Image: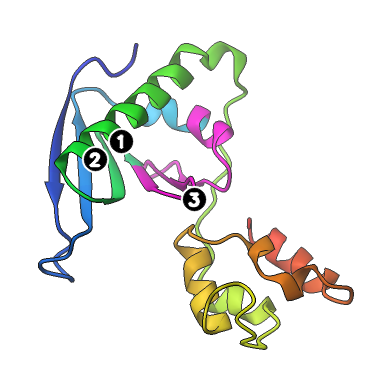
Amino acid sequence: MLINHYELEMFSPPCDPGSPIWVAIVKTDVDLAPVMPYVNAAVKNGFYQPKAPALVWGDGVYKYSLQRNAINIKPLKDRKHAERTAKKAVDFINDIWEKREQITPDHTTRVPPKLLDILRFLPRTNCGRCGMASCMAFAAKVVEGEKEIEDCPPLLEEGMEEKLEKLRELGL
């Protein structure tokens, strides 16, 4: 097991005082850099920067940031929610570490695409079929990992193959 002990800290984002959304910081007493290439290989659309070292990914519900001695997780509702989610994240990291002999590490450096890079290849119809009020709002949700490019119905229509391919080249 890589992570045997950790401490959980929580804070409300300073940009939104009194917010019902919390961020958890899972502080470890071990260096998590060695596990990052394995986690990078295991997660979808992770953004890995080995020189930092840091890895960011989302699972559709939560956004995770893996740093040398900490795992940040958001959005969370309260301490109990944070404790459950932190345990799952630690178990996930430990499971990958235990199976590392069976995983080909991925050292590929990827950085998240910028909002305007995504918007450039969206249909810009502001049709709302994705559930968002505008293509700009949709692009923001993609950057945050809360939406996938496949959530944009017009991108899946005939004639949009080139734009969809360009978005996939961005790592989406």
Measure how far apart labels 2 and 1 are at the Cα level. Answer: 6 Å
Dots 2, 1 in contact, CB < 8 A: yes
**Disc 3 on helix, strand or loop?**
loop
**Disc 2 on helix, strand or loop?**
helix
- Asked if residue 146 is positioned above or below residue 77 in the image, the reply reads below
- Asked if residue 122 is positioned above or below residue 156 in the image, the reply reads below
Which residue is at a point 52% across and 16% down the rendered structure image?
100
Which residue is at a point 18% across and 37% down the rendered structure image?
80
Which residue is at a point 17% across and 65% down the rendered structure image?
19
Where does residue 164 sit, x and y in percent of width and height? 76, 67
Measure how far apart labels 3 and 1 are at the Cα level. Answer: 14 Å
- Asked if residue 92 is positioned above or below residue 40 in the image, the reply reads above
Of pointers 2 and 3, the one earlier in the residue sequence:
3
- The verdict on residue 163 being magenta is no
Identity, as a three-letter code, of the amino acid under mark 2: His
Where does residue 62 sit, x and y in percent of width and height? 39, 48
Where does residue 139 sit, x and y in percent of width and height? 54, 73
Residue on which disc 1 sits? 85
**How many badges with numbers are in the image?**
3
- The verdict on residue 54 being magenta is yes
Dividing the picture into quarters, in which one does residue 50 lie?
top left
Which mark is on residue 60?
A: 3
